[in-house]
């Protein structure tokens, strides 16, 4: 991830900056993987939203959101995923979530949102 991928209001001195780590990778086929680790809550969701929006504006062939490193996914994080789903659909960009932790799977299952997404346990599928 580059500084251009971060929202303007985010800086290293931000007290919530270290709660969520994000990185992006573009494959040869044009698919973009955004990998997230940490917590997605009210304070960190705007950072995730900004990075996902930036990647969708680049019109990748597919957007893969790797949530394998997420230990907590709150309602604000769920809202970001739903908004990203809608934006990807509107742009005809495939969207896939990589889920390997119970915290993320439970949050999506309990809310009934799990069926909205294509879900895998491997970023390379």
Image: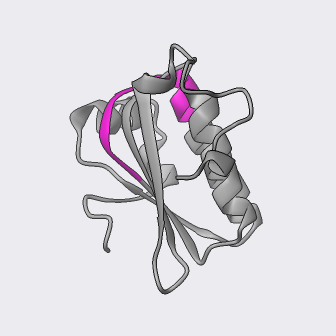
Task: Please determine whether, in this image, residue 68 is positioned above or below residue 43.
Answer: below
Q: Is residue 7 left or right of residue 27?
A: right
Task: Please determine whether, in this image, residue 71 is positioned above or below residue 67.
Answer: above
Q: Is residue 119 left or right of residue 13?
A: left
Determine the residue positioned at 61% across, 27% down. 11
The outermost residue toward the bottom is 29
Q: Quadrant of residue 124?
A: bottom left
The residue closer to the viewer here, 84 or 115, is: 84
Q: Position of residue 74 (x, y in %)?
A: 46, 22
Q: Position of residue 19 (x, y in %)?
A: 41, 23
Is residue 75 found inside the magenta-colored segment of the image?
yes
The outermost residue toward the top is 15
The secondary structure that most of the magenta stretch takes on is: strand
Quarter of the rendering occupied by the C terminus: bottom left
Q: Position of residue 112 (x, y in %)?
A: 46, 37
The outermost residue toward the front is 13
Q: Look at the image and give the residue range highlighted in magenta.
A: 66-78
Determine the residue positioned at 64% across, 59% down. 55
Task: Please determine whether, in this image, residue 61 is positioned above or below residue 49.
Answer: below
Is residue 58 found inside the magenta-colored segment of the image?
no
Q: Position of residue 123 (x, y in %)?
A: 32, 65
Task: Please determine whether, in this image, residue 28 is positioned above or below residue 52.
Answer: below
The residue closer to the viewer here, 119 or 57, is: 57
């Amino acid at each position: 991830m580059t500084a251009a991928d971060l929202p303007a209001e985010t800086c290293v001195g931000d007290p919530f900056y270290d709660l969520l780590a994000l990185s992006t990778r573009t494959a040869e086929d044009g698919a973009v993987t955004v990998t997230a680790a940490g917590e997605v809550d009210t304070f960190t969701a705007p950072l995730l939203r900004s990075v996902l929006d930036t990647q969708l504006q680049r019109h990748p062939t597919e957007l893969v959101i790797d949530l394998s490193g997420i230990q907590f996914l709150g309602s604000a994080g769920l809202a970001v995923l739903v908004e990203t789903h809608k934006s990807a659909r509107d742009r005809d960009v495939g969207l896939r979530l990589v889920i390997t932790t119970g915290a993320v799977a439970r949050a999506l299952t309990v809310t009934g949102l799990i069926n909205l997404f294509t879900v895998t346990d491997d970023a390379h599928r």
